Image (tube, rainbow, N blue to C red):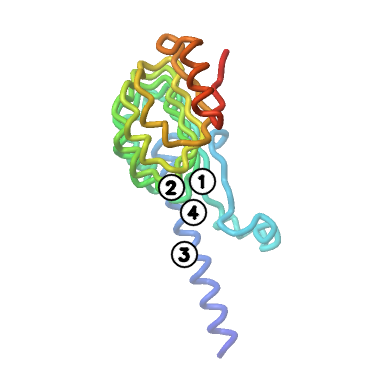
Amino acid sequence: MALVTIFVLLVMAWGWFYWGWSDEQRVLVELHVRHTGVLYTPIVSPWLRGRLGPSCYVLDRVTWIGLFNRGDITDYSPLTRLAKLEALDLTDSPITDISSLIHLRNIKMLSLKGTKVTNLSPLVHLINLKAITLTDTPTEDISPLAALHMLTSLSLDGTSVKDITPLYQFGCLVIDLPKSTFTETQVDELQQRFPGWIIQRK
């Protein structure tokens, strides 16, 4: 009886993980994502995953997804079902409103490079964000970024940002500044004021 109970529990556990895996696969189909633009990470240690056998693919979850220059996507809300997503690259995508991303609480890296995003306020919900790329966006106001206490890397090159005082709270930051706004003298002054910053110069 005990063996039967254990077997039933194992089957139920496998079914639960399979349901999570299959739902993520449906998201990829909905977004027409090529598997070359997806990275999977097991929700257990890779060592353990490798020893549980081939059927344990159900433990794999999408942790990185690239949607580069995807003009065919109009609805990004399916992304919220990728609960383990840690990195999202939307480079040159037509997205303008990022409010559909507010439930991606595990996300650590986000690229909005080349998009038309201007309103960054939804980012205040993504408290685990460490790296954001805003290169070549029409962004002007970065005040929402002050709420991201984990932030360590930020690219503002090609933006219209003039006020970076919301960033003054960060002791350590790797940053690209818009060259059309900040002169070499201003960059030197910032570097002296914030010795923990690494200001990228090209």
CB under 8 Å between discs 2 and 1: yes
Specify which label sits upstream in the sequence, 3 or 1: 3
Picture coordinates of residue 78 (x, y %)?
A: 36, 42
| Residue in view at x 45 percent, y 41 percent | 129
CB under 8 Å between discs 4 and 3: no
For marks 4 and 3, give the CA distance. 9 Å
Question: Exactly how many numbered labels are in the figure?
Answer: 4
Q: Give the quadrant of the N terminus.
A: bottom right
Q: Amino acid at mark 1?
A: Val
For marks 4 and 2, give the CA distance. 10 Å
| 143 is higher (above) or lower (below) than 17 | above
Specify which label sits upstream in the sequence, 4 or 3: 3
Q: What's the mark number on residue 16?
A: 3
Residue furthest bottom as drawn? 1
**Callout 1: few (<14), some (14-19), or many (20+) C-alpha neighbours within 10 Å?**
many
For marks 1 and 4, give the CA distance. 9 Å
CB under 8 Å between discs 3 and 2: no
- Residue highlighted by disc 4: 21
- Residue highlighted by disc 1: 62
Q: Find numbered disc 4 in the image and state the secondary structure of the residue it sits on.
A: helix
- Residue highlighted by disc 2: 82
Q: Find numbered disc 1 in the image and state the secondary structure of the residue it sits on.
A: strand
Task: Answer whether residue 34 is visible to the viewer in this image.
Answer: no
Specify which label sits upstream in the sequence, 4 or 2: 4
Picture coordinates of residue 113 (x, y %)?
A: 44, 23
Closer to us: 126 or 88: 126
